[in-house]
Image (cartoon, helix red, strand yellow):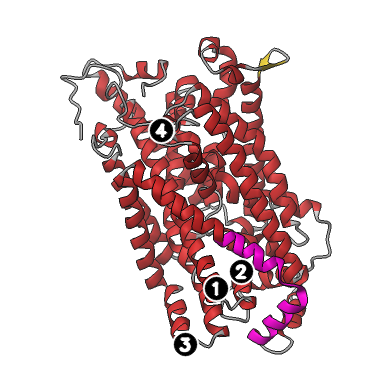
Amino acid sequence: MRPVDLATEKSVFLRNATGLVRDFALIDALILAVGAMIGPTWVPLFVSEWALFPGVNVPASFVLIGIFALANGAYYVFITAVMPRSGGGSYVPLSRLVSPILGMGMTTILVVAFLLDMGFIGNITWVSGVSPPLATYAAITNNSGLATLAANIGSQTWAFALGTVMIILVGLIAIGGNRFIRMANKIAFLVGTLGMVLIVGVLATTNLSQFQTAFNTFAGSNMYQNITATAQAAGYNTNVNWLNPTFLSLPLSFFAIAGYAFNTYYGGEIRKVSKTMSIAVVGSIFFTGAFFSLIAALAQNSFGTDFITSASYLGSAGKWPLGPAPYVNTFVAMVNSNPIINTIIILSFIAWGYLLIINYYFISSRHFLAWSFDRSVPSFFGSVSDRLHSPVISLVICGIIGWFALIFFTYGPAAYVGAVNLTFFFVLAFLLDGLAGIVLWRRPSILDAAPSFAKRKVGGVPLISLLGAYSIIFMGYLLAASLYLAFNNPGAIGTFSLATGIAALVAFLIGAGSYLGMRSYYKNRGLDISLAFKEIPPE
């Protein structure tokens, strides 16, 4: 590690170089982007969309959010081309072009969201991705040992233990450096993608009659028909216009694909960053949107739209009569008894869970590093191993916070867990990123040094400024829609309580307060760290 002493280091920056290297090629950036988008959360997310927005067209929802996201993704490509640094995408542009207080405050909200979600993914990978399809496969094969294992994995104790192991192991890979991350990511991506392809294959070769027979064999005579009748008797009605519920579902669909811009936060470690980022952002949106749209359309065709929406409604309302939850992967296991296919599908959920958590380690630690590089937080956050080229201390801190989040999401009282609205945290954290692009209109010296594509103008206005304005409007719509759902349909997206607002405000104040406190600390020692925010940090 390289400790820094003010007596020997007079630069406003922590040191003259970050200690990081540009290890990530195009395939690595694309894998990280896709891995940040899929995750194991899509199965309960599909249930939420079908259950809580009667009449929703889920395939159309993902197509729409993908189209809207393209311009937002283009903004992150442009702003990263202007400032290709770790902490790029939001912190470096906001702190340099708008205000260091705003940059620190908003990215602290973002990092809190990442680390909270680390704990959530550590839990849901096992509870939603592994236990339900394993329990279903155990039932159709009459394997009591697998049934016991599935029940244990779905329990609080096992989910917490497995989540803990997962957070530790992924943290060790992150500490090991980019070489280990790249290798593990490629393996996880291959397993995860193969699992998704197999799900598509099973759905594409299963017709409605085959599924009805398989479901009734599993659940009991006429249970397929009873599921729809029970939901309708409870007041569920899918015979409504699809347009309004589909637009209302967009915040949930966005939450599934939000990772397309995540790799802009470590632009300082990506080779040929402008070209790589362009392909990674756009490619990940097309890859993920296509998979989700296809799976939703095939599931509705294979299982029946009325059935899958009714099953989702009963599952969300706590009235589902069977043991395994009504997830797509659960129903796939009912019509497929091939142990190899089922094993790969289950492993794919673990692989996607890994890719999400490695993103959260990677991005959060790079924000700690960027903050410390500007001396906005204590310098030990910026320590980078000379041998591993990884910020070990920051990674350990991220893992500890993520583990406490796992405890919260596993054992926390429902009233408090439900109040932590992660969708709100993420959308709020992205809300003002576009301000940096708008301000660039008045900063020609910075814009002139950017790659040629980032300097393009439309009607005399820099395209990056127009994309920045669009990004604020896009995120503003998602935030407004999230708040509407939180107050009018809290089952869809979680409640918005006073606790949620206070938590976001506290996160902002911690970040802003850290900068102000460190600025005062160094000012008393003859160093004005505010000067760091007048230039782009060195690599």
In the rendered structure, which disc, 2 or 4, sits on the residue that comes first in sequence? 4
In the image: residue 391, left or right of residue 236 = left
Q: Spatial distance from mark 3 to mark 2, Cα to Cα?
A: 22 Å
Given residues 197 and 241, the one toward you in this image is 197
Crowd around label 2: few <14 · some 14–19 · many ≥20 (10 Å): many
Label 2 to label 1: alpha-carbon separation: 8 Å
The residue identified by callout 1 is: 133
In the rendered structure, find residue 144 and report the number of the disc placed on it: 3
The reply to whether dot 3 and dot 2 touch (C-beta < 8 Å) is no
CA distance for labels 2 and 4: 38 Å
Q: In this view, does 306 lie above or below 408?
A: below
Whether residue 517 appears in this view of the structure is no
Distance of label 4 from label 3 (alpha carbons) = 49 Å
Residue type marked 4: Glu
Q: Name the residue under label 2.
A: 327
- Please, what secondary structure does the residue beneath circle 4 have? helix
Asked which secondary structure carries label 1, the reply is helix
Q: Considering the image in quadrants, where does the N terminus appear?
A: top left
Which region of the structure is painted magenta?
Answer: 195-218
Q: Residue pushed farthest left?
A: 7
Which class describes the residues within 10 Å of circle 4: few (<14), some (14-19), or many (20+)? many
Residue annotated with mark 4? 269
Question: Are circles 2 and 1 on residues that touch, CB within 8 Å?
Answer: yes
Q: What residue type is labelled 2?
A: Tyr
Q: Does the magenta stretch include residue 210?
A: yes
